Image (cartoon, rainbow, N blue to C red):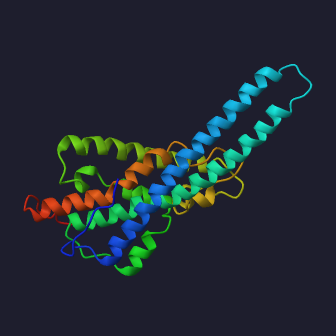
Amino acid sequence: MDFPAFTEAAPLTALEIEALRALHVTLQDLRHEYESALALTRRSYRMEGNAEVYTQGRAMTHHPDALHQLGRLADRYERGVGLLAWRYASAAAVLGTSILDRVVRGRPALTAAAVTELCEEPTLGRLRTALSIPSTDLLIAREPAFRDRHEEDRRELLRGVEGVIECAAEIGDGVPQDAAALWAGRLTNFDRLGTDPLYEGVLGPLLPYADQFPNEISWYLKQSRAGALPHQNG
């Protein structure tokens, strides 16, 4: 999805637009790389399984042993890319939500300090807050059926983030078990090797969700300029 062209008449600061674009193009590359890393992991384990079949019962198992090591290397690469993608996808989701919410409600532009902060990985609590805003409050320029589909995605993601907290609480190894401390922390700080990635099952839907916001902001502004939509109070 291409980054939209915002005109000078758009009620966004140059820094807000720059931040949206920076995270958007970053996500494009990381999303493709994460998909490639997943494919690499699946291919490595498939090759290992095939090698185990023909070496079963034989003394020389160098082939499956090597492919097992290859799979472990692929796992580590996938995890590293996944954590990097999470860091930017979660930031893009919170930044995009914040800007769209303030534009829809007619609030003042974000300060430079706020924009800079929102480009960093958010705490899980801050991500939960962003995901807690109903699509009916954000996507007011869209048709009801469109909003309903995105509302399902939003609710699924919110449940997924809540699941991250539950999984993180069971890790130990220096990860707090207190819910308040977990919500105040960041996923990348809690992830530990030897456990399933905390982003598993959540990163996949988060990537397209975070990717939507520049175009949703642009769409809202076009409809607003056409006089089709009033600002919400808030």
As drawn, the residue found furthest toward the right would be: 59
Q: Residue at x 86, y 30 (%)?
A: 61
Q: Residue at x 30, y 45 (%)?
A: 150
Q: Residue at x 20, y 59 (%)?
A: 220
As drawn, the residue found furthest toward the left would be: 227
Q: Residue at x 19, y 63 (%)?
A: 221
118 left or right of 135?
Answer: right
The quarter of the picture where residue 188 lies is: bottom right
As drawn, the residue found furthest toward the top would be: 57
Give the total number of marks visible in the rendering: 0
* Whether residue 33 is situated above or below residue 112 in the rendered picture: above
Q: Position of residue 35 (x, y in %)?
A: 53, 45
Q: Position of residue 47 (x, y in %)?
A: 70, 31
Q: Looking at the picture, tell me which residue is in the foreground, 156 or 219.
A: 219
8 left or right of 74?
Answer: left
* Whether residue 146 is situated above or below residue 54 in the rendered picture: below
85 left or right of 55?
Answer: left
* Whether residue 33 is situated above or below residue 54 in the rendered picture: below
Q: Position of residue 53 (x, y in %)?
A: 76, 21
Q: Is residue 68 visible?
A: yes
Q: Is residue 126 visible?
A: no
Q: Position of residue 1 (x, y in %)?
A: 35, 53
The quarter of the picture where residue 106 lies is: bottom left
As drawn, the residue found furthest toward the bottom would be: 112
30 left or right of 71?
Answer: left
Image quadrant holding the C terminus, namely bottom left
Q: Looking at the picture, tell me which residue is in the foreground, 104 or 228.
A: 228
